[in-house]
Image (cartoon, coloured by chain):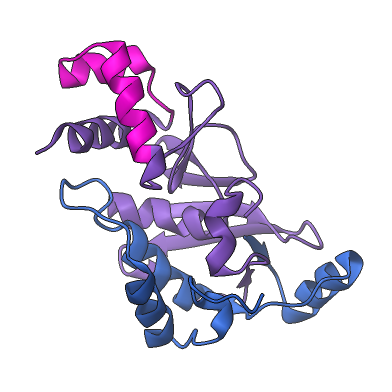
């Protein structure tokens, strides 16, 4: 899970490794994921999202590709 | 609270206050138990994907978003520096601590430095992108690689 300065640099990184490019995530989307996963991590009631919840969280911020499905077997 | 929650909170509070993983003895003292109780708790937290341990079963490699080892992703928060496990977790640290921070990392391809200010409501405007090679279904198969 890496940062990249541009889409072109993601493409170059993938080409150099002969791997497919995955869906790109903006910093605003990444912040939403960070808050959802970690905002309660230091509290007693913290818990990890379950698979269905994960899929809904990703979809809510526009990440609805099967890549983000924790139960997908297409990758 | 149950015992494993006590252990989790002791681990996370230590990371939050020091930026480093706690020793087993520290967690045992915090939870008023012995070292073996903590190790057993660690194993259960690992099974529940809360912690990632080194092979010794005692050393915490990851308590996401915190890393127990140095990484290229650092977070400045006040006078303290934290290591994050990955780009996602670099934003996860200010989200977990509910404080303003500055994330430092590098472009995965060019090596260009990233300096991203993160406020309580999110990061400053930025054109940088996040890319994850491993699909969500396989993240925990090898979390260090992910």
Q: Where, by quadrant of the figure, is residue B9 drawn?
A: top left
Q: Position of residue B96 (x, y in %)?
A: 32, 52
Say whether residue B8 is visible: yes
Say whether residue B14 is visible: no
Q: Give the range drawn in magenta.
A: B20-45
Q: Which of B120 and A50 is in front in this view?
A: A50
Q: Please say if B139 is above or below B73.
A: below
Residue at (42% x, 27% y) in the render? B21
Q: Where is residue B47 in the image (x, y as percent from the top left)?
A: 39, 42
Q: Chain A is drawn in which colour?
A: blue
Q: Where, by quadrant of the figure, is residue A58 drawn?
A: bottom left
Q: Position of residue B95 (x, y in %)?
A: 34, 58
Q: Chain B is drawn in which colour?
A: purple
Number of marks in picture: 0
Q: Is the magenta stretch mostly helix, strand or loop?
A: helix
Q: Position of residue A71 (x, y in %)?
A: 49, 73
Residue at (81% x, 62% y) in the render? B110
Is residue A64 highlighted in magenta? no
In screen coordinates, is A1 left or right of B93?
right
Q: Which of A63 and A11 is in front in this view?
A: A63
């Amino acid at each position: 899970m890496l940062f990249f300065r541009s889409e072109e640099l993601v493409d170059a990184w993938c080409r150099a490794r002969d791997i497919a490019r995955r869906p790109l995530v903006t910093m605003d989307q990444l912040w939403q994921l960070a808050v959802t996963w970690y905002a309660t991590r230091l509290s007693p009631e913290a818990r990890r999202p379950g698979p269905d919840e994960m899929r809904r969280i990703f979809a809510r911020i526009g990440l609805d590709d099967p890549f983000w499905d924790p139960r997908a077997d297409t990758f | 609270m149950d015992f494993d929650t006590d252990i989790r909170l002791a681990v996370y509070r230590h990371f939050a206050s020091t930026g480093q993983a706690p020793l087993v003895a520290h967690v045992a003292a915090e939870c008023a138990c012995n070292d073996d109780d903590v190790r057993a708790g660690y194993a259960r937290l690992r099974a529940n994907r809360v912690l990632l341990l080194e092979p010794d079963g005692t050393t915490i490699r990851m308590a996401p978003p915190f890393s127990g080892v140095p990484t290229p992703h650092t977070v400045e928060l006040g006078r303290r520096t934290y290591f994050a496990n990955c780009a996602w977790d670099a934003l996860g640290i200010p989200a977990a601590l509910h404080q303003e921070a500055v994330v430092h990392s590098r472009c995965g391809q060019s090596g260009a430095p990233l300096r991203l200010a993160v406020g309580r409501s999110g990061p400053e405007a930025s054109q940088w992108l996040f890319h994850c090679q491993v699909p969500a279904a396989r993240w925990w198969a090898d979390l260090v690689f992910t």
